[in-house]
Each structure stands twice: as C-alpha cells, then as structure tokens.
Image: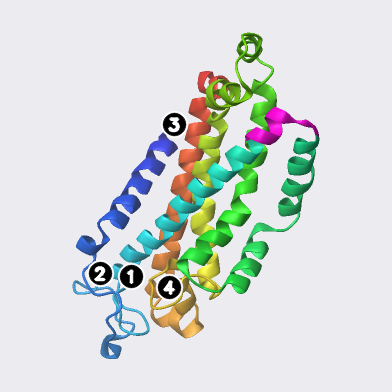
Amino acid sequence: MNRLTYIGLAIASVFILTALFAPLIATHDVTSINTAIRYAPISVEHWFGTDSLGRDVFSRLVFGARISLEVGVVVVIVSAFVGIILGAVAGFYGGWLDKFLSGYLFNVFLAFPGLLLAIALVAFLGAGLGKLILALCIIGWVGYARVMRGQVLKVREYDFVQAARALGASNFRILFTHILPNAIQPLIVQASLGMAGAVLSEASLSFLGLGIPPPAPSWGTMIEEGRGFDILYNAPHVLFIPALAIALTVLAFNFIGDGLREYLDPKQRSR
C-alpha cells in the first residue's frame, strides 16, 4: 500500500478513537448554552471556540464524529449485506430472476440521483437518526449489488466452480462456499468508499435540516449554523472546523479505498 493509504488509516483511526471515547475526550457539555460567550474565539478554555449559543465547538465536534461514523458503519453493513445477497442471487441463477433484479429493480434505483432520493425519503419518513440510516440504506445497496453481480458472473465460470458442480455440490454450497469468498474482494473497496459517501450524505442531509434534529451535534448541522456572512467574517471557526472534519474523514476513507484497490489487485500491486 502507498503512503497515502497509511495517512488515511491514521486519520480514520483518530476519528474512530474520538468517536469511541467521546465522553472522555469532550471538555464541555454539548447541550450547555451560555449566550454570554457566544462566538468566543479559540482559547485555552474553548479549544475550538464557541458557536451562536455559546456551546463548545470542540465538544460538539467530538460527539459529531460519533454520529457520523455510526451512520457510516451501519449504512455500509446493511447496504453491503442486502447488495451482496441480491447481487449474488441475480448473477448466479440468471434467467428471469436476473432480468427482474438487474434489468428492472437495480435500474429503477440507479435512475434517481442518490442524494435527491434520500432527501425525498427523509422528507417522507421524517427526521431522526434511525430514519436517516434507513433512507441511506435504501439508496446505498444497489451499488454493492451491481458489483457483486458482475463478480459472480465471472467467478461462476471458473474451473473450481465447475468441478464442485460436477461433484454434486448444491447451489447453496457452491454460491456461499466457492463463489462468494472469491468474489468479495471488490466489495471491500466499495465498502471503504461507501463509508466516505455515507458520512458526506449524512452531513448534507443534516445541513439541509433533514438529518439528525438539534440539539444533536451533527457536523452538517454545525456547518448550517455557521454559514451566515457575519458569522463567517467574525467567527470563521464555527464553519471551517466541522467542514475540515468532514473533508478529512471523507479523504481518509477514499485514501483507504484506493490503497485497498491497489493491494487487492495483483496487477496494480506489481506495478
């Protein structure tokens, strides 16, 4: 793996540890309001300053990491599970089942821009962490399904699969014992990139007011609260610090995904 991959791993590790130990790292109560110190600059008392309600930006950033990574992990796990099952079934059995799944169902979800579909779903379901995760899972599984279908179509023609079929192995055994372990590698890369996409989607929906409702310290909500011109001029830390956290998180998981792609592909690794 290249140097950027290790940089991504280091950045991601910092955010993951921050999310896990948020109550120990945070220096203030994230919901504590003190309007007397609103928009306070960076200081020893408030490491990243305060926001419009006098809340500590550093503490809210720390707990915001927990929300963003929780959304990312759950969305990736659920989306990958659903996508792997549907993609594997479509690629392995083919015929009318493949035509229905890949020809109709997959294309229906791909026909809509992902973020717009998520906005529509969240607007219909309502705000909340669980509903936000559900909406992102609904739009996220199809990417894993298409990748898995393509891999299964390739692997099912390999000699060892044909040998297992000739020995009388059941379809279930062939699919889950012989094909899936040899088709899963691209899904690992897809999951890393999907983690970055889920974090960015959660921040985007929260910025639009369709994500986690206040006073939960979502990074997207923090950016929305600091986007006014007067705030940007007088207290830029309110906007730029959560924006930097989102950028670093997305960049880290993209670096990891690129490194995994290079490591798992023998041609790129030898190059």
Element type at mark 1: helix
Residue in view at x 34 percent, y 43 percent: 10
Task: Give the label, 1 or 2, closer to the camera.
Answer: 1
Q: Which amino acid, by three-letter code, is at mark 4?
A: Met
Amino acid under disc 2: Trp
Pick whichever of labels 1 and 2 is earlier in the sequence: 2
Asked if the residue under mark 2 is in contact with the one under mark 4, i.e. CB atoms within 8 Å, the reply is no
**How many C-alpha atoms fall within 10 Å of the one at disc 2: few (<14), some, or many (≥20)?**
some
Q: Which residue is found at the position 41% from the left and 66% from the top?
A: 242
**Residue 41 in the image: above or below residue 144:** below
Looking at this view, is 33 or 139 the one in front?
A: 139
- View extreme (bottom): residue: 36
Q: CA distance from mark 2 to mark 3?
A: 33 Å
Determine which residue is flagged by label 2: 47
Earlier residue among tags 4 and 1: 1
How packed mark 4 is, by other alpha carbons closer than 10 Å (few <14, some 14-19, many 20 or more), is many
Disc 1/disc 2 C-alpha distance (Å): 11 Å
Q: Nearer the viewer, mark 4 or mark 2?
A: 4
Magenta span includes 219 = no
Looking at the rendered structure, which numbered label has been put on residue 52? Answer: none
Instruction: Tell which of 263 and 23 is nearer to you.
Output: 23
Kind of element beneath mark 3: loop
Tell me the magenta residue range: 88-95
The residue pinned by badge 3 equals 2
Query: Cα distance, mark 4 to mark 1?
Result: 8 Å
Q: Which residue is mark 1?
A: 60
Q: At label 1, which amino acid type do we have?
A: Arg
Q: CA distance from mark 4 to mark 2?
A: 16 Å
Q: Is residue 179 above or below residue 136?
A: above
Q: Earlier in the sequence, mark 3 or mark 1?
A: 3
Precedes in sequence: disc 4 or disc 2? 2
